[in-house]
């Protein structure tokens, strides 16, 4: 049986470089991106800029990323308000707080008025703190009963990193029972 020769990096085939972009290719890439991902205008522009850096430009005039993104917004392929609401509600359901939602939407290029709407109301933010406590077994959800000071500090730090305000964190971590937390959340439902 013949032995396979050892790997020789010098014999490795080079990948052909991708073709530089022109207006038609850039539009096709943008269309494929918005068809595949829920996105914001800022994220689409960042994607196109990255692809432009990777592949270069081969058009007569310079690339018009702003015009292309604007056209996609006008057509309705990209809607920052819908993206912000969906992203904000998804993060709230997963137990993240308003500050974390604001960071995620800011990174996506969402304007402040839309970020404000996506943070949720007081009841939704309290419910998110409860979800995180239940998921991570913080406060009254702990299996081991009352927690010591060091563990409580770790729980507080984790909830603060998740974007919850300190007053919500204290309420959750110091709650005496699950029922007390449910009542705290329901206080704002009126």
Image (cartoon, rainbow, N blue to C red):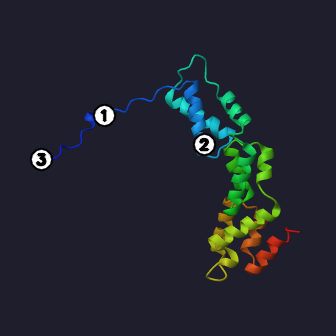
Q: Residue at x 64, y 46 (%)?
A: 38
Residue found at the very far bottom of the displayed protein = 145
Residue matched to label 1: 13
In this picture, residue 5 sits left or right of residue 49: left
**Which mark sits nearer the N-terminus, 3 or 2?**
3
Estimate how packed mark 2 is, as few (under 14), some (14 to 19) or many (20 or more) residues with alpha carbons within 10 Å: few
Estimate how packed mark 3 is, as few (under 14), some (14 to 19) or many (20 or more) residues with alpha carbons within 10 Å: few
41 shown above or below 21: below
165 shown above or below 56: below
Expressed as whole percent of the image width and height from the top left, the position of residue 13 reads 31, 34
Tell me how far mark 2 sits from mark 1, CA to CA: 33 Å
Tell me how far mark 1 sits from mark 3, CA to CA: 23 Å
Residue found at the very far front of the displayed protein = 75
Q: Residue at x 76, y 61 (%)?
A: 165
Q: Which residue occupies the foreground of this view, 159 or 89?
A: 89
Residue 2: give its label.
3
Residue found at the very far top of the displayed protein = 60
**Which mark sits nearer the N-terminus, 1 or 3?**
3
The quarter holding residue 119 reads: bottom right
The quarter holding residue 35 reads: top right
The answer to whether mark 2 and mark 1 are in CB contact below 8 A is no
* Labels 2, 1: front one: 2
59 shown above or below 150: above
Looking at the rendered structure, the secondary structure element under dot 1 is loop
Placement of the C terminus among the 4 image quadrants: bottom right
Q: Which residue occupies the foreground of this view, 175 or 22?
A: 22
Residue found at the very far left of the displayed protein = 1
Residue matched to label 2: 35
* Labels 3, 2: front one: 2
Tell me how far mark 3 sits from mark 2, CA to CA: 49 Å
Looking at the rendered structure, the secondary structure element under dot 3 is loop
**Which mark sits nearer the N-terminus, 2 or 1?**
1
């Amino acid at each position: 049986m013949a032995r396979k020769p050892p790997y020789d990096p010098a014999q490795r085939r080079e990948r052909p470089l991708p073709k530089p972009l022109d207006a038609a290719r850039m539009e096709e890439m943008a269309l494929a991106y918005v068809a595949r991902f829920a996105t914001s205008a800022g994220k689409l522009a960042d994607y196109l800029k990255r692809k432009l850096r990777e592949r270069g430009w081969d058009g007569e005039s310079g690339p018009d990323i702003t015009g292309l993104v604007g056209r996609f917004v006008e057509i309705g392929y990209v809607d920052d308000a819908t993206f912000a609401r969906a992203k904000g509600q998804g993060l709230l359901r997963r137990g993240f707080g308003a500050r974390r939602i604001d960071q995620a939407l800011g990174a996506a290029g969402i304007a402040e008025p839309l970020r404000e709407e996506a943070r949720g109301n007081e009841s939704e933010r309290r419910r998110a703190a409860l979800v995180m406590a239940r998921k991570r077994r913080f406060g009254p959800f702990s299996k081991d009963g009352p927690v010591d000071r060091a563990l409580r500090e770790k729980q507080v730090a984790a909830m603060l990193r998740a974007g919850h305000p300190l007053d919500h964190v204290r309420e959750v971590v110091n709650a005496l029972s699950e029922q007390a937390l449910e009542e705290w959340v329901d206080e704002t439902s009126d």
